[in-house]
Amino acid sequence: MLGLFCIFAIAVCGLAAVPAWSVLLAAIALASVSYARHHILFRRAADLGLQGSIDHTIVGSLLNGLIASAVAYGCGAALRALSSGWQ
């Protein structure tokens, strides 16, 4: 539920014309939620010596969060542009 709230919040930021750097904050929030949900698996993998895989997974999660945040912000900005009549 927190992940959906982060995506909704960044879409509202796009609608409200909040500066675009807020996309980075939302991406970090999404990656943090993902890490919080899977920290036990990361700990088990670290015990098995799979640190490289953990690093790739965390970077991938951050990249996915960045893409999701940018798309949600863009949708909010597009809705703002449509509602203002392209003025």
Image (tube, helix red, strand yellow):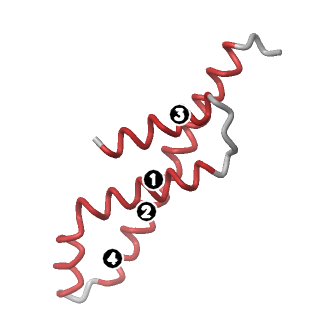
- From the image, state whether disc 3 or disc 4 is nearer to you: 3
**Residue 66 to residue 74: above or below:** below
Q: CA distance from mark 1 to mark 4?
A: 16 Å
- From the image, state whether disc 2 or disc 3 is nearer to you: 3
Structural crowding at the residue carrying mark 2, measured as other residues with C-alpha within 10 Å and reported as few (<14), some (14–19) or many (≥20) = few
Q: CA distance from mark 4 to mark 2?
A: 10 Å
Question: Which residue is located at x 27 percent, y 62 percent?
Answer: 36
Task: Say which quadrant the C terminus sits in.
Answer: top right
Quarter of the image where one finds residue 76: top right
Q: CA distance from mark 2 to mark 3?
A: 22 Å
Q: CA distance from mark 3 to mark 4?
A: 31 Å
Structural crowding at the residue carrying mark 1, measured as other residues with C-alpha within 10 Å and reported as few (<14), some (14–19) or many (≥20) = some
The mark that comes first in sequence, 2 or 3, is 3
In this figure, which residue is indicated by the disc labeled 1? 64
Task: Tell me, yes or no, whether the two marked residues, 2 and 1, touch with CB atoms within 8 Å.
Answer: yes
Q: Which mark is residue 60?
A: 2
**Residue 61 to residue 81: above or below:** below
In this figure, which residue is indicated by the disc labeled 3? 11
Instruction: List x then y, in percent, for residue 65.
Output: 46, 52
Q: Amino acid at mark 2?
A: Gly
Structural crowding at the residue carrying mark 4, measured as other residues with C-alpha within 10 Å and reported as few (<14), some (14–19) or many (≥20) = few
Question: Which residue is located at x 58 percent, y 29 percent?
Answer: 75
Task: Say which quadrant the N terminus sits in.
Answer: top left
Q: CA distance from mark 2 to mark 1?
A: 6 Å
Instruction: List x then y, in percent, for residue 33.
Output: 33, 56
Q: Amino acid at mark 3?
A: Ala
Q: CA distance from mark 1 to mark 3?
A: 16 Å
In this figure, which residue is indicated by the disc labeled 4? 53
The mark that comes first in sequence, 4 or 2, is 4
Question: Which residue is located at x 21 percent, y 78 percent?
Answer: 43
